[in-house]
Amino acid sequence: MNDINRKPEDASAPSEMLYQGRWLRLRRRGRWEYAERNNPGGAVIILAVTPDDNILFVEQYRVAIQQFTIEMPAGLVGDLADQEHEGSLIAAQRELEEETGYRCSRVTFVHEGPTSSGMSNEMIAFVRAHDLVKVSDGGGDVTENITVHEVPRQEAGAWLLARAKEGYSIDPKLFAGLWLIEHAALFG
């Protein structure tokens, strides 16, 4: 039986700032180095299914990996100057419309967990968007060049694997997202 209260010896060491950038900080605690976001709200990933039973995916170039990716609509919580205190549900509605051109009547929390627990303290919340209505073309803000894909739910897994064979980087969280779309009721 694992004892979840058992921590490494240096886990309680004070945190030391190594670098402060506009969006990220690099820190060290004991012998561990990790990144953290400057925004306190973490991130949100949106599970969005259109009235035609299509799942919304977004395609964009990611400089950090030098590759085009397929992702679910997502974004940072509280990253805008006038919205530092927004919650993940409000951020999800904003990001969904900005990236995909779809507005939803409501969003519900599904699950939250670390994006990369060995490298970052960032948490990401999965939320489900409900009652989608197309209001614009989407494509992101002025700093983004997002292509929106609407893929029939029953074909989504195969579609993602086909994009991987074409050379796209497929965010593994997409497969968790597909599972959560089908099983969100398990989470309350």
Image: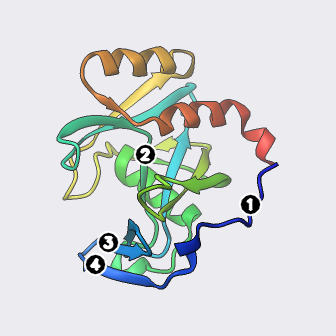
Residue 73 is labelled as: 2
Does the image show residue 43? yes
Residue 25, by quadrant, is bottom left
Look at mark 4 in the image and give the residue it sits on. 18
Upstream in the sequence, badge 2 or badge 4?
4
Disc 2 is placed on an element classified as loop
Look at mark 3 in the image and give the residue it sits on. 26
Q: Amino acid at mark 2?
A: Pro
Mark 4 near mark 3, Cβ–Cβ under 8 Å?
yes
Upstream in the sequence, badge 4 or badge 1?
1
Task: Find the distance from the CA under tag 2 to the CA under tag 4.
Answer: 31 Å
Q: Nearer the viewer, mark 3 or mark 2?
A: 3
Q: Is residue 33 above or below residue 82?
A: above
Residue pictured at 23% horizontal, 35% vertical: 68
Q: Nearer the viewer, residue 91 or 61?
A: 61
Disc 1 is placed on an element classified as loop
Q: Nearer the viewer, mark 1 or mark 3?
A: 1
The picture places residue 49, in percent across and down from the top left corner, at 56, 34
User: What's the image's color scheme?
Assistant: rainbow
User: Crowdedness of circle 1 by 10 Å Cα count: few (<14), some, many (20+)?
Assistant: few
What is the number of callouts on the image? Answer: 4
Residue 14 is labelled as: none
Q: Amino acid at mark 1?
A: Ile
Residue pictured at 67% horizontal, 55% vertical: 109
Residue 89 vs residue 91: left or right?
Answer: right
The picture places residue 156, in percent across and down from the top left corner, at 49, 21
Q: Amino acid at mark 3?
A: Leu
Residue 4 is labelled as: 1
